[in-house]
Amino acid sequence: MDLFFAGGVSYCLAAAAVNFFNRDNVRHVETLESIPRFNELKELEQLLDVERLPLLVAISGNVVSETPIKCEITGLRGVIVEEREERHYLQRDISIGQCKDAATQTQNGKIDIYWKNHSSLLSSNRKEVPWYLDDGTGRVLVVGARGGTDFVLPAGTSTFEKLEQTQINETSDHIQLIKVKGLKRIERVLPVGTALTVVGQASKDDDGTIRIQRPPKGPFYVSSKAIDEHAAKFVNYARSCEYTSTGLIVLGAFQIAARIYYLLHRRRRCSEL
């Protein structure tokens, strides 16, 4: 098999692979479009009273909590808060030749002494309190939101506290001088009042609390986007895969047909001679 013919076969095999992986996109679209949606949360409560079984649903509402967290940096009231503290410092280094991403401080022959920015994580903390989605007609407890697809903490800020400290670290090779620039504190928050859409498994506890969480099998979204936007994303992925697959098939078929035509034409000429 020559390279030209093998290339055509490879294109066709690539098209088959694209079609195979595209089945996941089609499956996601079908699943999202089949999920029941509720305009009012009280309708979900009424349905769970009848069904008594966990259901895969899509709901929307605003974030509320009876015990919100008072954020130190942003000043917001949130239900999920992530805090990080980083130390930023300059470290003197020695290398042969100039470093492109660092300012050279001293040059002696071919050896450059320069200062390079570094940072290290000092602490990381996460806080979360029980919170609900509320639309005015009812509320649903959201469990395990951080593991949901498309989940982000939409609000956040940071502060920087300057410090003037010089540290000397002794290593086996030489003494490294470190200049501490300061401490950076970062805070990310899911604030009370944020509008969210959650796709997951809804159920009713013995005490009457309705909760939504990741299902044993199926999608779990916690997002500011509507369910139609997620479905449209997979539709676009599927369409792109179809176009790619069609292009690969056409290209592969053309190469195979051209090679077959060339071989037949050459055989005919040989027979005529």
Image (spheres, rainbow, N blue to C red):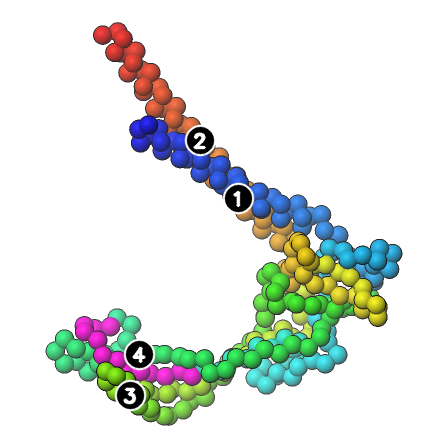
- Image coordinates of residue 222 in percent, x first then y, are 64, 63
Is residue 57 left or right of 182 when viewed as pictured?
Answer: right
Q: Which residue is mark 3?
A: 170
Around disc 1, counting alpha carbons within 10 Å, would you say few (fewer than 14), some (14 to 19), or many (20 or more)?
few
The percent position of residue 73, horizontal first and vertical second, equals 56, 84
In this picture, residue 273 sits left or right of residue 81: left
Is 95 in the magenta?
Answer: yes
* Secondary-structure class at tag 4: strand
Give whichever of discs 4 and 3 has the lower sequence position: 4
The main secondary structure of the magenta stretch is: strand
Q: Looking at the image, is mark 1 or mark 4 earlier in the sequence?
A: 1
Residue type of the residue flagged with mark 2: Val
The residue that disc 4 covers is 116
**Tag 1's secondary structure?**
helix
**Eye-nearest disc, 1 or 4:** 1
Q: Which element carries disc 3, helix, strand or loop?
A: strand
Q: Specify few, some or many for label 4: CA neighbours under 10 Å numbering under 14, 14-19, or 20 or more.
A: some
> Callout 2: few (<14), some (14-19), or many (20+) C-alpha neighbours within 10 Å?
some
Furthest residue to the top?
272
* Viewer-nearest of discs 2 and 3: 3
Residue at the spot of label 2: 250
Spatial CA span between label 1 and label 3: 54 Å
At label 1, which amino acid type do we have?
Phe
Label 2: which secondary element: helix
- What residue would you read off at disc 1? 21
In the image, farthest residue toward the front: 172
Q: Residue at x 66, y 45 (%)?
A: 30
Please say if 246 is above or below 100: above
Pointer 1 or 3: first along the chain: 1
Question: Is label 4 in contact with label 3 (beta carbons under 8 Å)?
Answer: no
